[in-house]
Image: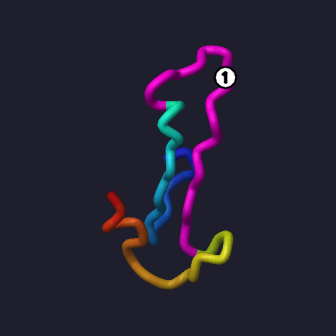
Amino acid sequence: MPTGANARGAAYAVPWQNVTSHDASGADQPVTVYQPGKDGIPPGGKAFGAAIR
């Protein structure tokens, strides 16, 4: 995991451009990380992101 292990889970949103047309120059879009307790997401819970597909 890019930000290290998190006991409460995490969800990562990878832009399709990064997956379908990797840019060797490093111009890929940033990956968004959602973690409990950060950016307004409540800190409680045990398996954040478990049901995201």
Quarter of the figure with residue 20: top left
Q: Is residue 53 left or right of residue 1?
A: left
- Residue 4 on image: x %, y %: 54, 52
Quarter of the figure with residue 28: top right
Q: Residues within 10 Å of mark 1 (few under 14, many from 20)?
A: few
Q: Determine the secondary structure under disc 1.
A: loop
Q: Which quarter of the image is occupied by the C terminus?
A: bottom left
Q: Which residues are magenta?
A: 19-36
- Residue 21 on image: x %, y %: 50, 22
Exactly how many numbered labels are in the figure? 1
| Residue at the (48%, 37%) spot, across then down | 16
Please tell me whether residue 29 is drawn above or below residue 32 in the rendered image: above
Please tell me whether residue 30 is drawn above or below residue 3 in the rendered image: above
Q: Is residue 33 left or right of residue 45?
A: right
| Residue at the (66%, 77%) spot, across then down | 40
Question: Label 1 belongs to which residue?
Answer: 26
Decide whether residue 29 is among the magenta residues. Answer: yes
Q: Main secondary structure of the magenta part?
A: loop
| Residue at the (60%, 15%) spot, across then down | 24
Decide whether residue 52 is among the magenta residues. Answer: no
| Residue at the (55%, 73%) spot, across then down | 36
- Residue 35 on image: x %, y %: 55, 66
Q: How is the image coloured?
A: rainbow
Instruction: Say which of 24 and 15 sits in front.
Output: 15
Q: Is residue 28 left or right of residue 1?
A: right
Please tell me whether residue 41 is drawn above or below residue 4 in the rendered image: below
The residue under label 1 is which amino acid type? Answer: Gly
- Residue 44 on image: x %, y %: 50, 84
